[in-house]
Image (cartoon, grey):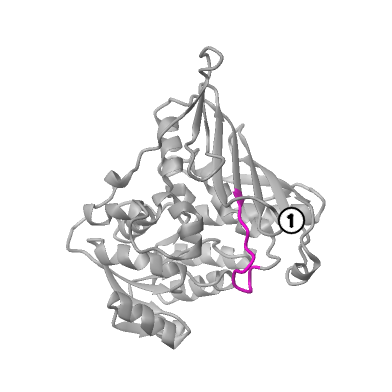
Amino acid sequence: MSADRKVRVAIVGLGFGAEFIPIYKLHPNAEMYAVCRRNRAELDACGDKFGIAKRYTDFDEMLRDPNVDAVHINSPIPDHGPQTIKALKAGKHVACTVPMATDKEQIREIVQLQRQTGKTYMMMETVAYAREYLFAKDLYDRGVLGRIQFLRGSHQQDMDGWPDYWPGLPPMWYATHCVSPCLAILSQPGKSALAESVVCHGSGRIRESLIPKYNCPFAIETATFKIKDSDVVAEVTRSLFDTARQYRESFDVTASNVSFEWQQVEGEDPVLHTRGLPEGQIPRRVKVPDYAGRLPEPIRKFTGAIHDATHLSFVQGGGHGGSHPHLVHNFLTAVLGSQPAFPDAPTSANWTLVGICAHESAVKGGERVHIPAY
């Protein structure tokens, strides 16, 4: 990839989205060109802070700017689908925070538009680039784990006090953080592992004031899903309200030789269980390495929490496992044609549809729901 080729990026949504501005500014193949936010005062504050002159309060106006090559969407969840569709129709490459959308038809349209336009679409799924996941994936690819027998993910988070589209949100509508590693680890270059069907049960009940917006009473949703052309089944658990648990995005791999278990509490180290060792030696905690060496030197520092990152999801989530610069780098290299986006549009759709179909299953009392292929 030529060092002088630059993608002109516009970031939409400057709460969580602002965390990516310093990374784009330092990436050798990006020009941090424009920012977009509805609130003019907050837009100007962000633009002044980071020295970005091109500013928009209107998303549609920004899309008409011919200098914008790529749009990175970090807006509220209900806007993800409609804004992505508009951006692809405008001929822009799109990176979008999770989930891809909460509506099946919007997801279908995004996949179709990406194919029609040939533009890059990438869902910016943090866990698929977190250092703990990269460590487990490396062990699997090198044959250390052996045969994968079972996968488990969980994402538990207290969303009280977050913006008004969150209260009462069906937990599985925001499941990609625990679904993605289960499918990504079985994926190979050019061939993504995909879920084909899911069974989910809702458990418990959130307070009555939270229920009416989405008509979802469940405090926790737990799903098992089958993986296409595989004998492996994965289980994922999600909670958003009225559940006492420290923030945790986790991923466990049960395998024939060595199993990997994500840390239970922030600040601990993951555990490897090695089969065949004497009792007492089977489990051991392991220090997970940093994978900054995979990145261009100017953005390697962003795998640590050493920069001025303040958004609650970043702080509460322990820095998202150092994933942000990996996401930016993969997106930019995909736009420039050096490698495919991961996850690409069909893969992002499948990761998102697992959760949408899981909630459908929970509402139906645990009926199996087949996941559409787009």
Task: Classify residue 206 as left or right of residue 148.
Answer: right
Quarter of the image where one finds residue 31: bottom left
Q: Residue at x 50, y 54 (%)?
A: 317
Task: Classify residue 224 as left or right of residue 6.
Answer: right
Reply above or below: 280 against 87.
Answer: above
**Mark 1, residue position:** 219
Quarter of the image where one finds residue 171: bottom right
Q: Residue at x 23, y 56 (%)?
A: 298
Q: Is residue 163 shown in magenta?
A: yes
Q: Position of residue 276 (x, y in %)?
A: 52, 14
Reply above or below: 332 against 90.
Answer: above
Task: Classify residue 42 as left or right of residue 282.
Answer: left
Where, quadrant-wise, is the C terminus in this rendering? bottom right
On the question of residue 343 being in view, the answer is no
Of residues 81 and 177, the one drawn nearer to the viewer in this rendering: 177
Secondary structure of residue under mark 1: loop
Magenta-drawn segment: 155-166
Q: Which secondary structure dominates the residues rendered in magenta?
A: loop
Of residues 3 and 242, the one drawn nearer to the viewer in this rendering: 242
Where, quadrant-wise, is the N terminus in this rendering? bottom left
Reply above or below: 291 against 15.
Answer: above
Q: Tag 1: residue type?
A: Ala
Q: How many marks?
A: 1
Q: Position of residue 341 (x, y in %)?
A: 40, 54
